[in-house]
Image (spheres, grey):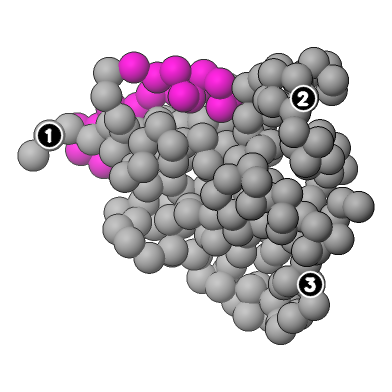
Amino acid sequence: MHSLRFLIVDDHALFRSGLRLVLKEGLPDVEVLEAASMEQAVRVTGGPPDLVLLDIQLQGVNGLEGLGLLQQRWPQVPVVMLSSIVEPDTIALALSRGARAFVSKGDTSARILELIQQTLGQPQLSDALVRRLRADIGPHPAEATQPRLTPRQCEVLDLLCEGLSNKMIARRLVVSEFTVRGHVQAILGLLGVTSRSQATFAARQHRLIG
């Protein structure tokens, strides 16, 4: 059996160091790579990792937006989402976009290791998160059919629907093309489509654009 290779993506160096220690002590023969941003993460060399531990609240392209970028680079690599702020809608959104598991940074080291080991094919939540989801998430049909875009995503969507390329959108919004690419991936995921033309059609259906 080959040694495991994990990638931690978190912009807090102290947390990365702590999680690295937990992984090294709890799992035999594991190599731990680190990245402080999505841009660093997708530039990791040496073959795909066996698992990515991804923080939601990153500077620049955040974890939710970066999920699509990781899935493009390493389609078969499972992603475990980490967050210190646990909101039911955020958990549901992360899992719907392809995260294999969602754990709170407040969980114990033993529980985090357990969830990592259980990350095979179905989303895994800590017991506390399951209880909170059951209590807080109810049926909201109207909300479920209406995508929730951030203000920045709305700006990107407007320009995308005008036919602008990622490079042109980046110039218009004075951000990097990498950041725009992350926003576009997030928008496609929220709209449930796979192309820019489909996104334009879906945006009109949802009355997100004129």
Instruction: Identify the magenta region.
Output: 27-45
Closer to the eye: label 2 or 1: 2
113 w.r.t. 175: above or below:
below
**Amino acid at dot 3:** Glu
Q: Is residue 99 left or right of residue 144?
A: left
Which quadrant holds residue 195?
Answer: top right
Q: Is residue 156 visible?
A: no
- For mark 2, give the secondary structure: helix
Residue 143 screen position, x and y as percent: 78, 72
Residues at marks 2 and 3, CA–CA distance in whole angstroms: 28 Å
Label 3 packing within 10 angstroms: few (<14), some (14-19), many (20+): few
- Residue 33 falls inside the magenta stretch: yes
- Closer to the N terminus: mark 1 or mark 3? 1
Q: Which residue is mark 2?
A: 169
Which of 96 and 154 lies nearest the eye of the viewer?
154
- Closer to the N terminus: mark 2 or mark 1? 1
- Closer to the N terminus: mark 2 or mark 3? 3
**Amino acid at dot 2:** Ile
Circle 1/circle 3 CB separation < 8 Å: no
168 w.r.t. 198: above or below:
above
Residue 113 screen position, x and y as percent: 37, 50
Closer to the eye: label 1 or 3: 3
Q: Is residue 81 visible?
A: yes
The residue sitting at 27% across, 24% down in the picture is 47
Marker disc for residue 143: 3
- Residue 153 falls inside the magenta stretch: no
The residue sitting at 48% across, 54% down in the picture is 98
The residue sitting at 73% across, 71% down in the picture is 145
Label 1 packing within 10 angstroms: few (<14), some (14-19), many (20+): few
Q: Which residue is mark 1?
A: 2
